[in-house]
Each structure stands twice: as structure tokens, then as C-alpha cells.
Image (cartoon, coloured by chain):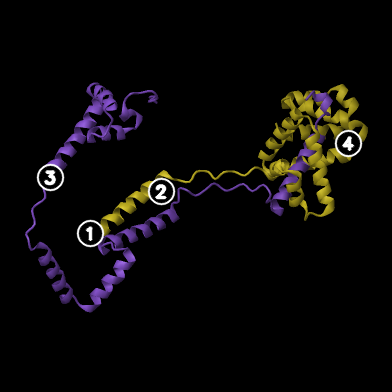
Amino acid sequence: MRLLRRVLLLWTLGGAAWGLWAQPGEPARRPHPLEQLRRMAPEERERVLQNMPPERRQMLEERLERWERMAPRRKQHLDGRLSSFQQMKPEQQQALRRLARRFQETMPEGKRLEGRRALTMLQGLDPEARKRVLGSARMRERFSEQERELLREMAENMPD
Amino acid sequence: MKSTKGSACPVERGEEEILLRYCAGTLAAEGAAQLEGHVTSCSRCRMWVQEQQMVWRALESWELEPVTADFDAALLARIAREKEARPGWRGWWERAVGAWSGGLEWRVAVPAAALALLLAAGLAVTNPFRGEPVETAVRLEAREIEQAERALEDLEMLRQLEPPEEDKKL
């Protein structure tokens, strides 16, 4: 009986020490589902997407192919932007989605390219400089007041 | 870490078996002579050999007590007496325990079994060998596919808000 008691004591102490030593760390993080899809072989991807409604599947595949066709540096750049965007708060993400939709819907097609260039330039400025540029004669000439306001809001909400 | 490659010291090389053979006198003469030279200069090997020689000497000096002429007969008679005095259930129990523990004394077998059970329970609770989640590339749940779709949509949105590739010289 004494032997059994000793064994129990040893086991308890040993178990506690072992438990402290073998503290489970952070579980391995699975890559983002998009990353998993990108890494899949075509036949694996086919198997995973086979039950999707055809229209949604076509859209997804087209976007994946567009990304795959991009130059490696462009891919890297856009992935970095996406990663920054995903780290934003959900409400900020939602706000930017709404602004982007407004940009596509309200900015005339002929002005969109110029709008994209203006947006990139405005993003790199501090709020004061941004205000000055947006109020400049050149910008007023090119964009309406609503368009300039939209560009300001977007520049403020864009991820780094 | 200290390199042991090329070292002449059997202890450093983890080849104590040579020293053991040397102490037992089973090493070939040439090898023994070489080793002897090393042992005189290596304190670790010298200590190892001295300790081993002490064990050999102790074994050599150990003498068995002579047994009496009627030892076997007395032992068999005692076993027979104890068998007769033992209750019937105890014989059955000992046979059962003997079969179960493979001839081990129950005083050893029972704690050993208890220890095995406790270890099994302990490992079930704090299993250090628990593997990392296995990444299964082919399994993607519907929810995860939606996440991928949303990410692609966002990527497309970000792409459309940037000047074309040629502008950025990317």
C-alpha cells in the first residue's frame, strides 16, 4: 500500500511537471481559405468547387485566374493591400466597400482612370495637404464637388 | 559542442564496450596494449576501468554458503506442508493472479498495472505528443469557400481602385 501511495505521489508530481513543460502552444494556423485555394492542384480545386452554384463558381474561377496571370510583384503588392484591408475593423472594411461601389457607380467611366490615379496620390498625403490638393484649380477642373468629396473619403479609408 | 570524431577515448566516443572487454580480458593483445597506453593517460578511462575492476574483484571474492546435505529434501517437505495448510480459495486466487501476471508477484503486478492505467489517464489529459492540426488541402468547408470568395471580391475592389499596372511600374 505504501508502494502504491508512493507511485501515486510520483505520478501526480511528474504529471504536473510534464503538464507545465508540455503547455500546448498556439495551434498552427491554417492558411486563409483563399491561400489554400490558390495552392491547390487543378483537380483538387475541381473537387472542392464542384458543389458550388455554376455562376458563383465561374466568378470565383475568373478572379483566381486573373490573379494567377498577374506579374509576381503585382501579386505580392495586392496581397499586401488585401492583408492590410483584412486587418481593418469590420465596419471600416464595410465603409470602404460602400465607397468603392459608389466610385464605380457614380464616377463617369471616362474619369475613372484619372480618379484611380488621383486616389493613389491623395493616399500618400497628410489630411492638410490632401485638402489643399483637392481644393486646387486643377482638381476642381477635373472633378465635381461630389467626386472630390468621394475621393477624399476613399483616401482616408484606404488600407496602407 | 565538443567533437568526438577521431578521438582515441572510448568514453568520449561512447564505446565503453571496449573498456568492458579490456577489463574482462577478452580484448586482443594488440588492442589491449594500445588501450592500456591510453588508460594511463586518460583520467576518465582510468576511473572507468578502476570502477569496473572493483566490481570484478567483488564478484570474484563472493563465495556461496555451502548448503547442508538434506537441503533439497527439507525444502520440498516445507513446500508440501505450506500447500496443505493453505485454504482452497487462496490456491484458486494465486493460480488466477499467476496466470494474469505471468508469474509475477501480485505485489509487483498490481502496482504496475495501476501505474500503467494512471499513465494512460495522465497522457490522455496532458498528451505532449498531441499532433498539430493536420492541414488537409482538399477539405474546404462551404464557409471557408465563402471566405475565399469574399477575399477575392475585396482583392478585385482594391485592384480596381489602383492605377493600372503600367502606371505603377510593378
Disc nearer the start of the sequence (4/2) = 2
Asked whether, in this view, residue B59 is left or right of residue A98, the answer is left
Marks 1 and 3, how far apart at CA:
33 Å
Instruction: Give the SS element for disc 3.
Output: loop
- Give the drawing colour for chain B: purple
Instruction: Give the chain letter at badge 1.
Output: A
Who's the residue at 26% across and 55% down the image?
Answer: A6
Tag 1 and tag 3 share a subunit = no
Instruction: Give the SS element for disc 1.
Output: helix
Marks 3 and 4, how far apart at CA:
105 Å
Tag 3 and tag 4 share a subunit = no
Q: Report the mark closest to the observer, 1 or 3.
A: 3
Instruction: Give the chain letter at badge 2.
Output: A
Q: Which residue is label 3 attached to?
A: B62
Tag 1 and tag 4 share a subunit = yes
Could you classify mark 2 by the number of other residues whose Cα lies within 10 Å: few (under 14), some (14-19), or many (20 or more)? some
- Give the drawing colour for chain A: yellow
Instruction: Give the SS element for disc 4.
Output: loop
Number of the label disc, if any, that sits on residue A19? 2
Q: Which residue is label 1 attached to?
A: A2
Q: Which residue is label 4 attached to?
A: A107
Q: Report the mark closest to the observer, 3 or 2.
A: 3
Marks 3 and 2, how far apart at CA:
47 Å
Contact (CB < 8 A) between labels 1 and 4?
no
Q: Does B72 appear above or below A67?
A: below
Residue A107: x, y in percent? 88, 36
Q: Report the mark closest to the observer, 1 or 2.
A: 1
Q: Quadrant of the N terminus of chain A?
A: bottom left
Q: Quadrant of the C terminus of chain A?
A: top right
Marks 1 and 4, how far apart at CA:
86 Å
